[in-house]
Image (cartoon, rainbow, N blue to C red):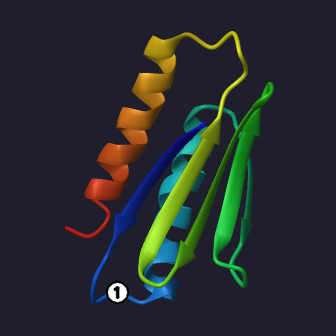
């Protein structure tokens, strides 16, 4: 399992969730992933063929956890994690 987190000082949890939700919807649409979000709980998830990712916003921080099926190559895992990291780093320009 991989875990990626970022802090956004000066931003409310709702602001962070809105931006992360927008990014995750876009990623899910591009990759044909099932996407669910819970605005009240400030969390969401994506899934496809045994792979699963969740995110939650708490205390000015977003945490993303990714679980991959055993047969997913390491290079694909790195690509996904780098894409998410890049999106989170550019969340608030």
In the rendered image, which quarter is residue 1 located in? top right
Nearer to the camera, 7 or 12: 7
**Residue 64 % position (x, y):** 54, 54
> What residue appears at the point 30 percent right and 45 percent down from the top-left corner?
86
Q: Residue at x 42, y 58 (%)?
A: 5
Residue 76 pos. (x, y %): 49, 17
For this orientation, the residue located farthest to the left is 93
Q: Secondary structure at mark 1?
A: loop
In the image, taking residue 54 as reference, residue 63 lies left or right, namely left
Coordinates of residue 8 in the picture (x, y in percent): 31, 76
Q: Dot 1 corresponds to which residue? A: 11
Identify which residue is drawn at 70% across, 54% down: 45
The image shows residue 59, relative to residue 24, as above or below, that is below
Q: Is residue 45 left or right of residue 6?
A: right
User: In the rendered image, which quarter contains the C terminus?
Assistant: bottom left
Relative side of 43 to 82, left or right: right
Answer few, some or many: residues within 10 Å of disc 1's Cα (few below 14, many 20 plus, some between 14 and 19). few
């Amino acid at each position: 399992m991989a875990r990626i987190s970022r802090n956004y000082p000066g931003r409310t949890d709702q602001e962070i969730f809105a931006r992360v939700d927008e990014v995750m919807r876009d990623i899910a649409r591009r990759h044909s992933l099932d996407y669910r979000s819970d605005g009240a709980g400030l969390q969401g998830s994506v899934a496809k063929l045994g792979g699963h990712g969740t995110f939650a916003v708490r205390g000015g921080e977003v945490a993303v956890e990714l679980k991959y099926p055993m047969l997913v190559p390491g290079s694909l895992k790195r690509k996904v994690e780098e894409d998410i990291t890049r999106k989170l780093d550019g969340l608030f320009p």
